């Protein structure tokens, strides 16, 4: 379908569709004569872009930049570094260590909350888990 029909179906303007195409938010749609043709795939791509923009209150240019960050490792690295420097992102290793630290603290806290049952089980031999011989798996 032509751009005017696609714009009408999507509730936008032909100019906005051309702008989105320049930003890389839909696949190139020009035919040999320079006319744009839209199929179902292009309509769905634009509809998805519109939904993302509305849901997250972002502009088409911001969405296009988000795609660029996902696709270009150099841009992704630069944005990650900025995020770390302004405190929006922690360094990946530090975040992993923080996670492990929190996990260890939770386990210790849970251990402290357990009642002492040693007086109830004193003199009992530890039971081997089923499927083991001398504590080793079969």
Image (cartoon, grey):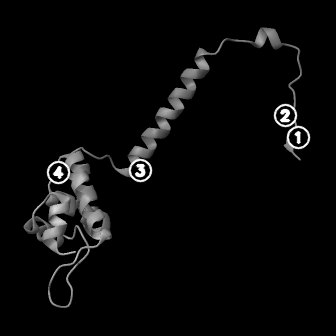
In the image, residue 21 above or below residue 61:
below
Tags 4 and 3 touching, CB below 8 Å: no
Report the number of discs. Answer: 4
What residue appears at the point 88 percent right and 14 percent down from the top-left corner? 123
- Residue matched to label 4: 58
Q: CA distance from mark 1 to mark 2?
A: 6 Å
For label 3, the SS is helix
N-terminal label among 4 and 2: 4
For label 2, the SS is loop
N-terminal label among 4 and 3: 4
N-terminal label among 2 and 3: 3
- Can the viewer see residue 72 in this picture? no
Q: Position of residue 19 (x, y in %)?
A: 11, 68
For label 1, the SS is strand
- Residue matched to label 1: 132
Tags 1 and 2 touching, CB below 8 Å: yes
What residue appears at the point 22 percent right and 67 percent down from the top-left corner? 25
Q: Position of residue 96 (x, y in %)?
A: 44, 45
Q: Is residue 116 left or right of residue 25?
A: right
Q: CA distance from mark 4 to mark 3?
A: 30 Å
What residue appears at the point 56 percent right and 25 percent down from the top-left corner? 108
- Residue matched to label 3: 93
- Residue matched to label 2: 129
């Amino acid at each position: 379908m032509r751009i005017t029909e696609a714009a009408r179906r999507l509730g936008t303007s032909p100019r906005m569709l051309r702008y989105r195409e320049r930003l890389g938010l839909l696949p190139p749609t020009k035919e040999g004569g320079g006319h744009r043709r839209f199929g179902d795939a292009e309509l769905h791509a634009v509809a998805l872009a519109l939904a993302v923009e509305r849901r997250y209150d972002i502009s088409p240019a911001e969405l296009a930049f988000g795609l660029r960050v996902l696709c270009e490792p150099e841009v992704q690295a630069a944005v990650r570094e900025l995020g770390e420097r302004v405190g929006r992102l922690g360094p990946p290793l530090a975040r992993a260590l923080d996670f492990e630290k929190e996990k260890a603290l939770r386990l210790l806290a849970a251990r402290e909350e357990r009642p002492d049952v040693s007086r109830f089980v004193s003199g009992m031999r530890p039971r081997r888990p089923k499927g083991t011989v001398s504590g080793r798996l079969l």
